[in-house]
Amino acid sequence: MKAEFNFRDYATYAQMKHWMKNIEFYYPNFTKNFQIGTTSEGQAIHGIKIGTPTKAQKKRAIWIDGGIHAREWAAINTALYFINELVAKYGVNDEITYYVDTLDFYIVPCLNPDGYEYAHTRTADPLSFRRMWRKNRSKENCIDIENGGKSCCKGVDLNRNFDIHWGLETRDPTTSGNTTSIDPCSDIYQGPRAFSEPETRALRDILLSPELKGRTDAYITLHTFGQIWMYPFGHQKGVYPDDKNDLESVGRAAVAALAKAFGTKYRLGNSADLLYPAPGSSVDWAKGVAGIKYAYLIELRPPPIRLTGFILQKAQLIPCAIETWEGVKVVVDAILKLHN
Ligand code: VAL
């Protein structure tokens, strides 16, 4: 591998972009950097396309993103690790070579760089407010509250901001708390309107662009934590896509392949059934509006027991990425089967 990266630690956003640019420099024949948009703080939302160009008809594509939530750092590392697997093993490993020659991988490892950088800025307390930041960093929004007061805060929960059942009132069955909010100071603030945020608009626009529309067969969005492999729809219990059986059988094979690596156990299901209803999410939109067949949201390590689960021990980063890649390869194989 000509472009080195330290997967044992959490990088800055600048380091990630620098590494992706290095990859393109060293592997210009099958990699290309791209930018899907600009955040409210002016940062490029940066990604990399990995796929050998063909003169023949357009290749099928797979989309992978990570870090839509600022504090879910292991998701970003995992997406970066996927890039490394594809690039370092191209021309070396037959399976990966076939993938890269046959498909186009679009990977945006850090969809919310403003939030990530904010959460990543060092503070003395590892569990500080900053480290646990979830939203983006868009300018303050306000709502009127009782006694003529106002509630004003920065940031929107990007995974509540997509235009699919946006703003639906939902409750967590265990705590009875809301699972999306109209209060700008809430962690799960849905935004003033659907697609109010540059990050969600950027994702929408690329997935609906002529480059990707109609040829994308998988949408994979990496989150932490809880070890759950999820398929749509997450906004309400008991509402599934028509091809739920396909999503479930590929998902089942994926979690089995994942477990084979180190024995890590994942549950399979959807957010509303296993956790809580989540309207306006990217995975529901990718499936329900963009029409992408294999849409999955993966909640990575650790298991759902600890409050500090967002801070995955550094020693676990590579194993987490390795096993997740085993699961994702099952989805890639399913795409290849669709067209052969
Ligand atoms: N943890 C995710 C979220 O709250 C759900 C949808 C699985 O966005």
Image (cartoon, rainbow, N blue to C red):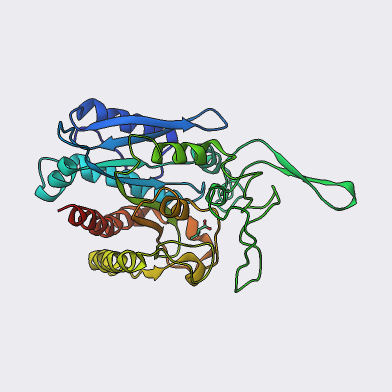
Q: Farthest right residue? A: 147
Rendered position, 45 above or below 232 = above
Residue 30, quarter of the rendered image = top left
- Residue 102 horizontal/vertical position (percent): 16, 43
The count of marks equals 0
Q: Hey, which quadrant is residue 211 in on the image?
A: top left
Name the spot of residue 129 as percent of width and height, x first. 62, 49
Q: Of residues 121 and 46, which is closer to you in this image?
A: 46
Residue drawn at point x = 45 percent, y = 60 percent: 225
Q: Is residue 335 above or below residue 239?
A: above
Residue closer to the observer: 299 or 202 = 202
Of 90 and 321, nearer the camera is 90
Percent x, y of residue 192:
66, 44
Q: Residue at x 32, y 44 (%)?
A: 214
Which residue ends up furthest to the bottom in the rendered image?
174
- Quadrant the N terminus occupies: top left
- The image position of residue 176, as x and y in percent, is 65, 71
Q: Is residue 211 left or right of residue 187?
A: left
Q: Which of the pair 226/213 is nearer the observer?
A: 213
Residue at the (41%, 39%) spot, across then down: 208
**Image height of 263 relative to 279, above or below:** below
